[in-house]
Amino acid sequence: MLAAMSASPLTPRPPGDACARSSGDACPGALRLHRADDGALARIRIPGGVLTPRQVIALGQAAERLGDGELHLTSRGNVQVRGLAEDCGAELAELLSGAGLLPSERHERVRNVVASPLSGLDGVGAVDVGPWLTGLDRLLCGSDRATALSGRFLFALDDGRGDVDSLGADVTLVGHASGDALLRIGNGESVLRVPAADGPRTALLAAEAFLDAARETGAWRTKDLPAEAVTALPDDVARRLGPAGITCVTEVLPHPPEARTPAPGRVTGPGHEAALSVGVPLGRLGPGQWRLLSGAGELRLTPWRGAVLTGVPPARADGLLAELSAAGFVTGTGSPWTGVGACIGSPGCAKSLADVRAEAGAAVGPAGRLPVYWSGCERRCGHPHGEWIDVVATPAGHRISHVRGDRSTEAATVRDDPAALAAAVAAARGTHT
């Protein structure tokens, strides 16, 4: 158990963060490469995490031909290619563009959209978010104003099951039992109910309202706005909907208490084809693993560093699941890797104080009740949302905290002793009963 201490706000990102407002929007993209200790890095935005078979192949080629061969999944269902040569930008752009992964060069870093990965597959959820996803991406890529959004501004499309609604997006559409869409701005519980077909346009109008509210403060995300500005945004959006021909009603929708992440294994649903959900330990995929994911239909990458393979012939499902398990994927409950995450750490990141991926692997034990995330420095890049055990490398050792929302309760720092660190993390996570 963690030592009992008073809760305190989660430490914010320091000014030195690559995406801090004080230093300009330096978030990497597919066209703006980021220099890391292991070479250049490209972050390819994949709205909703949805990839066609052709796009899966193209990303694999990009990693093997231009990078270090591996692909890294992010907490937004995007893909990072690392170990790139600094002069490969034109070749990478040509490869991605040919596969339809760069529909608009001006908008490639603002196509930040997460979506319920099991929507339309398992019979759960009030709506299928597929039309919302294609509609919103098309509107974003066609909007001049959208180019002013930062590389961190996030849209979420939740089919009503409450999975991505818990991820702290700036603009969220949630499916309603009536078939309508509920628009949430930031973390507010006051939502606007609009016809489902108008959901994407409403989301874009909400983003434009945010840009107007942020004009004086320079805020990049809704959480950066003054509290009164955030409170006023729903009414501002409602006023914009009338002239756009969109009707709306204001309602209250509490946030889901926790995310309903896809369980690993075979996805049970009404469709004739099978779907498989797998976890990817630390979000890291080698060439052989990536090729296994390309052997079915549409691939959906999840915000929890997992993947959902769709269009699998039912007769092939059990065999493919066994192959995925043998290749190191999480394919069932109870895996020690379930809920374990980490940033890139050393040696890939110059700011990291430890090789946290190796440490996370060394500390893997029985599945814990709470997820755990290992960070090489105070920036906590890619950390989860909700409730988790936060392990941060510091000059004095590893600090372990229990995070709930934006509050954390600290335990004692564990100095450089791998056995003691593993024991402390296991105790903090608890065990399944």
Image: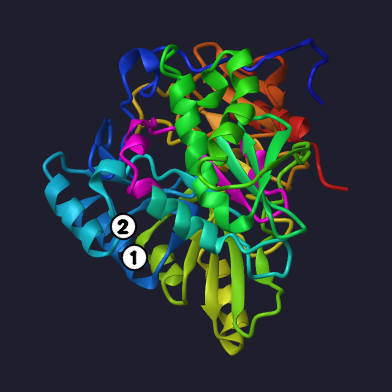
Residue 262 figure quarter:
bottom right
Q: Is residue 343 visible?
A: yes
Question: Are discs 2 and 1 less than 8 Å apart at CB?
Answer: yes
Q: Which residue is mark 2?
A: 101
Instruction: Tell me which residue sits at (28%, 32%) in the image.
Output: 36
Magenta-span inclusion, residue 80: no
Foreground residue among 337 and 85:
85
Label 2 CA crowd tier, 10 Å (few <14, some 14–19, many 20+): many
Residue 40 figure quarter:
top left
Residue kind at label 1, given as amino acid type: Gln
Please state the horizontal and vertical placement of residue 93, each as a whole percent of the image.
19, 52
Instruction: Tell me which residue sits at (45%, 68%) in the image.
Output: 293
Q: Which residue is mark 1?
A: 55
Over which residues does the magenta segment extend?
140-169
Please state the horizontal and vertical placement of residue 360, each as a whole percent of the image.
56, 38
Which SS class for mark 2?
loop
Magenta-span inclusion, residue 150: yes
Q: Is residue 100 left or right of residue 353?
A: left
Residue kind at label 2, given as amino acid type: Leu
Please state the horizontal and vertical placement of residue 108, each as a whole percent of the image.
31, 45
Question: Which is nearer the N-term, disc 2 or disc 1?
Answer: 1
- State which quarter of the image contains the N terminus: top right
